[in-house]
Amino acid sequence: MARPPKLTLDFFVHDKDARSDRRIRALRRKHGNDGYATYFCILEVLCGEDGLSLDLSTPIDRETTVEDCHLRDEAHLLIIS
């Protein structure tokens, strides 16, 4: 009997020089290391979600993500908008 397909990830590749990517550098310029940490926290949250997608359509979904990533108020506004 075949195993059901897995819809989540156990890990993702984080390149040793991810901080040098031009998009990550722009993120860090604008939001500092908090933006960098938040980006990778959201990737971690995505890995645990079925289908690797994050539903932020309801207030409870947004609040859970904010709590999971320990976001401050100003970062919270980025997720809501």
Image (spheres, rainbow, N blue to C red):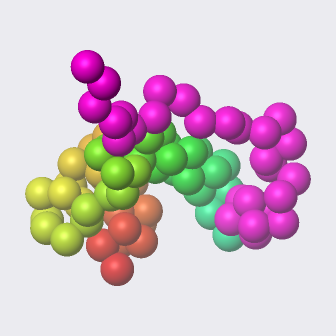
Residue 52: where, in percent of width, then height? Answer: 40, 50
Answer left or right for 12 relative to 25. left
Quarter of the figure with residue 15: top right
Residue 49: where, in percent of width, then height? Answer: 32, 44
**22 within the magenta span:** yes
Examine the rendered structure and indicate whether residue 25 appears above or below residue 9: below
Who is closer to the viewer here, 50 or 63?
A: 50
Q: Residue furthest top?
A: 1
Query: Residue at 32% across / 57% down in the picture?
Result: 54
Residue 68: where, in percent of width, then height? Answer: 32, 40
Query: Residue at 63% across / 63% down in the picture?
Result: 31
**Observer able to see residue 26:** yes
Who is closer to the viewer here, 23 or 34?
A: 23
Quarter of the figure with residue 17: top right
Who is closer to the viewer here, 31 or 53?
A: 53
Answer left or right for 24 relative to 1. right
**Observer able to see residue 73:** no
Who is closer to the viewer here, 18 or 6?
A: 6
Quarter of the figure with residue 77: bottom left
Query: Residue at 25% across / 65% down in the picture?
Result: 56
Quarter the N terminus occupies: top left
Quarter the C terminus occupies: bottom left
Q: How many marks?
A: 0
Answer left or right for 47 relative to 3. right
- Main SS of the magenta segment? loop
Report the magenta residues as a range. 1-29
Answer left or right for 79 relative to 40. left
**7 within the magenta span:** yes
